[in-house]
Amino acid sequence: MLILLSPAKIQNFAPQQLTNTFTQPTFLKEAEKLVHEIRQLSAYELSKLLSINANLGQLNADRYFNWKKPFTPTNAKQAVLAFNGEVFHGLNAKSFSNDDFEYAQSHLCILSGLYGALRPLDLIQPYRLEISTKLQVDTAKDMYAFWGDKLTNWLNKAVNASGKPKTVLNLASGEYFKSINRNTLKAKVIDFEFLENKDDLYKPIVMYTKKARGLMARYVIDNRIENIEDLRGFSSEGYWYSEKLSSENKMVFTRG
């Protein structure tokens, strides 16, 4: 069983003393190629490409200028500890035990516009590059085209290595899961919805959904879930499984 998450724009590269274990990203060579292309852009051009303001454009231009190999714990940080958005608040990897880190390393994948697919302990350096960015690289018109089948092929290997059942828990956003070819993914995919009761209507609220995805990922890691049916026991922060709203390939949780 493999968990898919999206990355976070907010990142924290302050030193950490939680684990000394680290690995290198699988697609570091591809990331280096993307960095080379981005370095050809001015801060203004990068701002336009990423749809960010001038200050963030300069910040990220500086990040790409300073991006360098080899990645070490002194110039990079483990991905699961560097990302700091709502999903990762829910995951709360800062409270992982050594066994949790080890389990997550083979059961959790973070999709990334720059790094492709990241394991939790893969070192990364600061960046901003959404998977939907229209950066032209060679004949590829955007990041979806650049990554092509690379991520799906990598996931197929990762699913095989993660043990049985051959299942992908899609806790990534639609934007990021679009980078995976569902037709050639050799695993059952389970989608998730987390809904809030507002005036007797169940609706998704983005901020809450993001955190709930991280909470679900943490639930799987804490309980070493191997049976899809056991996911129904998730009840963090008031969520409950909805038999009525769920289907064979989608699990819906509601609260309120």
Image (cartoon, rainbow, N blue to C red):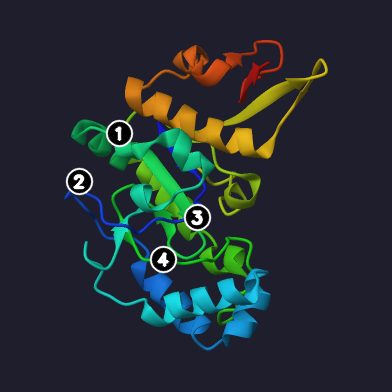
x then y, percent, for residue 29: 36, 72
The residue lying toward the viewer, choosing from 256 and 4, is 256
Local secondary structure at mark 3 = loop
Instruction: Give the spatial CA distance, label 1 vs label 4.
Output: 22 Å
Return the residue at label 3: 10
Return the x and y of residue 74 as percentages of the image width and height.
22, 66
Please report the residue visible at 35 percent of the width from the left and 68 percent of the height from the top: 28
Quick one: quadrant of the C terminus?
A: top right
Q: Identify the element where label 2 is drawn.
A: loop
**Marks 2 and 4, Cα distance to the nearest angstrom?**
19 Å
Q: Tell me whether circle 2 and circle 1 mark residues in contact (CB < 8 Å).
A: no
Q: Which residue is mark 2?
A: 19
Q: Circle 4 sits in a helix, a strand or a loop, which is it?
A: loop
Q: Amino acid at mark 3?
A: Ile
Label 2 – label 1 distance at C-alpha: 11 Å
The residue to which callout 4 is attached is 126
Residue assigned mark 1: 95
**Between discs 3 and 4, the one toward the N terminus:** 3
